[in-house]
Amino acid sequence: MNDWTAFGRVDADGTVYVKTAEGERVVGSWQAGTPDEGLAHFARRFADLVTEVDLIEARLKSGAADASHSLASIRRIRGTLADAHVVGDIDGLATRLDRLAGVAEEKAGEARAAREVARGEALARKAALVEEAEKIAAESTGWKSAGDRLKEILDEWKTIRGVDKKTDGELWKRFAAARDGFTRRRGAHFATLDGQRKQAQGAKEELVKEAESLADSTDWAGTANRLKELMSEWKAAPRAAKDAEQRLWERFRAAQDAFFSRRSEAFSARDAEYHGNLGKKQAILAEVEALNVEADPRAAQNKLRDAQVAWHDAGRVPREAAAGLDRRWRAAEERIRQAMDSAWRKTAPQDNPLLQQMREQVAEAEQRLARARAAGDHRRVREAEQALASKRQFLTLAEQAN
């Protein structure tokens, strides 16, 4: 508002008056310019007060301000209005401040009530923490988890505010006493474990010695099972002192790792060998399956004999491939046997050179078995026995057919 004459005036000698409901009063003197300039000067002072009140009101409505602090500011400004050196609607501002004072008082009351509620909640929380700590101190035997929980209680305790100093101090004494009681009880418990730890250390040293003695074993299955048993015994045994437990465990684990690493290398080499043998047997089988047995049964039988030797010499194959190969091999042998049976039925027994040849093959197989037994080679013995049984079966069937 530019016309401040509604709220004040400047008389001829420069005295400045403000108009209120109670009448005029002097607020200052103006000699530096025109009366309008004088009124504007004191009006700006009034505007500053209004701006301050605007800010207080805005902060009060937004909840950003402490209501009690806002109330103090409102009362301070309200108390200065009677003597304020300003020109403006002082009565209107006074009314506004009285209204804001009521709002601030209400909000301050709400804040006090909220603080009381918060204090009650904080007190309840701390009391509950104290009771939990006292229960832990009296009953808990889960030493690590209980100790960790007491630390958590302490951390939570530090975050709780609002309890009066006296009550807080009394609760703290109870909590500190519970924590100290737990510490003493835990210390007494672990003191009794020293003897047990020494016994556990001795037992685990024996487990380590046995594990280390097995590290170079080549009895893969038996040693693996025994090491698993030792691991179960290790887990069942009490813990030794921390440094001894770690040292013994490292030795125990190193022995296990050494054995299983060697076993893994051996199995890898065996698997590589078995896969190589598989390729050999597949090639042999493909040749046998490709034989034209109908055209020349005798030639097919001769080639089968050589193939049988090569088949058994090829060695073992991966387990997942063995059954399929064996089925195909037996089918190929059966196909040649049937062709030979058909040929033998067309030839007189005394003139049957195939029968004589099969007898010779049985004799050779018997000699091969004898040599394997003399050499003590168990694998060759098994293979020779299988080959001899197959040849004898072929001979029996051939003789029956003739």
Image (spheres, helix red, strand yellow):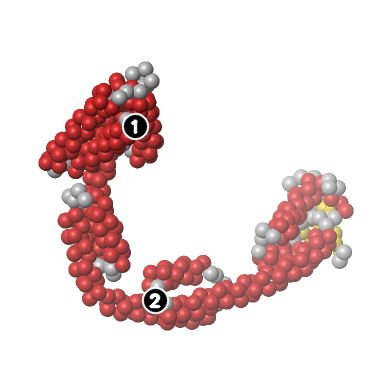
- Relative to residue 238, is residue 395 depicted above or below? above
On screen, residue 255 versus residue 12, left or right, reads left
Image coordinates for residue 73, horizontal then vertical, percent: 69, 64
Residue at mark 1: 401
Which residue is the extreme one toward the top?
295
Q: For numbered disc 2, what is the local secondary structure?
A: loop
* Badge 1 vs badge 2, beta-carbon distance below 8 Å: no
Camera-side residue of 302 and 346: 346
Residue at mark 2: 141
Q: Inspect the image, locate mark 2, and give the three-letter code of the amino acid beneath it.
A: Thr
Foreground mark, 1 or 2, reads 1
On screen, residue 267 versus residue 325, left or right, reads left
Q: Residues within 10 Å of mark 2 (few under 14, many from 20)?
A: some
Picture quadrant of residue 379: top left
Q: Inspect the image, locate mark 1, and give the three-letter code of the amino acid beneath it.
A: Ala
Image coordinates for residue 390, horizontal then vertical, percent: 29, 36
- Relative to residue 70, is residue 285 depicted above or below? above
On the question of residue 287 being in view, the answer is no
Q: For numbered disc 1, what is the local secondary structure?
A: helix
Identified at 20% across, 29% down, the residue is 360
On screen, residue 239 versus residue 60, left or right, reads left
Image coordinates for residue 84, horizontal then vertical, percent: 74, 61
- Relative to residue 307, is residue 217 depicted above or below? below
Identified at 18% across, 32% down, the residue is 364
Camera-side residue of 4 and 281: 281
Q: Earlier in the sequence, mark 1 or mark 2?
A: 2
